Image (cartoon, rainbow, N blue to C red):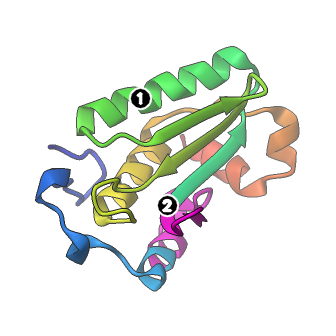
Amino acid sequence: MQCAAPNKKCEPCHSLDTSALLSREQVDQELQSKPSLALWKHETMEPNDVPFLCHRFTAKNFKAAMDALNDMGAIAEREQHHPDFHLTNYRDVQIDIYTHKVKGITKNDIALAEMISQEVKIEYSPKWLKSNPDAVASSKQQ
């Protein structure tokens, strides 16, 4: 498996075990130290408290949402690491990334979030951008 993020290499999930899991502190450190991950949040999934990386946004319209999802899907397929995608209200998007095999966050998940942030140009809703200043800086870097 290859990985486009600088200095990152994804490993096949079948070779991972629970020793690959990152602690909450390690995940938070990664999110805080990388500007490209400013829009990603560290959350937990009920009912088993499985940690995951989450990015939510409102796209400009349905086409913009689908374009972003298709681009993210191409990256996921290339890397053979597949996040959960959610599209609601025709333009509200949520991406959840975690390593299903070990039920938590690994370096592969951080790398995939970086790739998505760096490679996918998202056409955000202007109203959403106004209330999410971190996205303004992120969209100018793309």
Residues 43 and 134: in front is 43
Label at residue 73? 1
Front one among 48 and 128: 48
Identify the residue at horizontal 49%, vertical 61% (top origin).
52
Q: Residue at x 35, y 76 (%)?
A: 22
Mark 1: secondary structure = helix
Residue at image position (39%, 65%) is 104
Q: Which residues are magenta?
A: 29-52
Residue 130 covered by magenta stretch: no
Callout 1 touching callout 2 (CB < 8 Å): no
10 Å crowding of disc 2: few (<14), some (14-19), many (20+): many
| Residue at the (65%, 30%) spot, across then down | 87
The image quarter containing residue 86 is top right
Please, is residue 36 above or below residue 88 in the view?
below
Crowding around mark 1 (Cα neighbors within 10 Å: few <14, some 14 to 19, many 20+) is some
Residue 52's label in the rendered image is 2
